[in-house]
Image: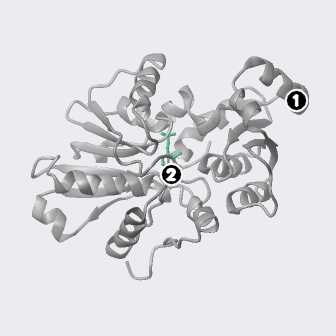
Amino acid sequence: MLRPNPVPNQFLTHSFLEEKGIELAVKRLDLVHPEVSGNKFFKLRHNLDQAKKEGKNKVLTFGGAYSNHIYATSQAAKAEGLECIGLIRGEGVKPFNHTLSSAEKAGMELHFIDRTAYRNKAESEFLVELKERFGDFYLIPEGGTNGLAIQGTSEILGPEDQQFSFICSSIGTGGTFAGLYASLSSTQYLTGFSSLKGNFINKEVSELIRIHRIYSEGQYSILTQFHFGGYAKYHEKLIEFIWWFYENFGIVLDPIYTGKMAFGLWELIRVRYYPRGSKVLMIHTGGLQGNIGFTERTGIKLPMDAPQGL
Ligand SMILES: *Cc1c(COP(=O)(O)O)cnc(C)c1O
């Protein structure tokens, strides 16, 4: 099974936090593995283990051309000695972007499917077709959320995190959020920041909780006002915040997930959403490979690595 590096909780110091009376730490899941970053490490771990237990030597999954999930799956499969196939939404335009060229280099076999086929990807007929075409495989859904992924993300928080009353995480499909929620203690409250536009995510998360029979001692709420226009949409203010965060704390954020969460969290602290004296833990879900593709796509520069001496 993929083995995690120790993940530090990095406490942040800033006059703003002092003034508001908030102790804030960042759980650096971006450091959990050299290639399989962030929450994707936890989502993939038990799935790849299960694939091996079922005697499958190949995994297949879906994703967009800049997807952290595609990148992480290619790296995780390589580390576990499994073959892997990535079905990518859209046309395969060469030269490949950073995500796809890295995935291919890690050994992922890439195939491109049009948007209609992509939409039908969960239908059984399509899956039968895929088995005829590619042979037997272990299927990992788009975004990687399933029961074993949630089992994995319920292992993110450890005993050292009991000191925090408030946990913050970004949300895509909700798989990470559902696992975090499952692992809360009765004194903990989870705040989710959706990267996607719309309130549908509340329903999706309730569904995940229901389908996977999650019982939690803690509580949660999801904020949907920090999407900056929707998935992969951004605003100059968000980019400026990511640079500001990097210059102050030496931590790189991405504009798709963690940047939006941190921006939202700063806003919550500013309006005293969390009571004075609160200890807050923000989960850095990783995914920094996406920054290279973001710059390729938009021409906008983002921080990449921690600067020397921080
Ligand atoms: C995939 C991803 C998420 C979203 O995770 P879900 O389990 O789909 O909600 C959040 N942050 C980063 C950096 C990601 O790559």
Q: Is residue 112 above or below residue 94?
A: above
Report which residue position mark 2 lands on: 38
Q: Tell me if residue 7 can be seen.
A: no
Q: Residue at x 29, y 57 (%)?
A: 25
Residue 64 x/y as whole percent:
66, 46
User: Residue shown at 21%/69% (left/top)?
Assistant: 14
Q: Residues within 10 Å of mark 1 (few under 14, many from 20)?
A: few
Disc 2 on helix, strand or loop?
Answer: helix
Q: Is residue 183 above or below residue 8?
A: above
Residue 117 found in image quarter: top right
> SS for tag 1?
loop
How much space separates mark 1 and mark 2, taking CA atoms? Answer: 30 Å
Cβ at disc 2 under 8 Å from ligand 1: yes
Q: Position of residue 114 (x, y in %)?
A: 77, 39
Read off the residue under disc 1.
135
* Residue 243 seen in the current view: yes
Residue drawn at (33%, 71%) of the image: 249
Amino acid under label 2? Gly
Mark 2, Cα crowd under 10 Å, few <14 / some 14-19 / many 20+, is many
Q: Judge whether 96 appears above or below 73 on screen.
A: below
Q: Quadrant of residue 155?
A: top left
Residue 187 x/y as whole percent: 19, 34
Nearest the eye: 288 or 257: 257
Q: Nearer the viewer, residue 268 or 215?
A: 268
**Disc 1 marks which amino acid?**
Gly
Q: Is residue 74 left or right of residue 150?
A: right
Residue 148 horizontal side relative to residue 66, left or right: left
- The quadrant in which the C terminus is found is bottom left
Q: Quadrant of the N terminus?
A: top right
* Colouring used for the render: one colour
Q: Which mark is residue 278?
A: none
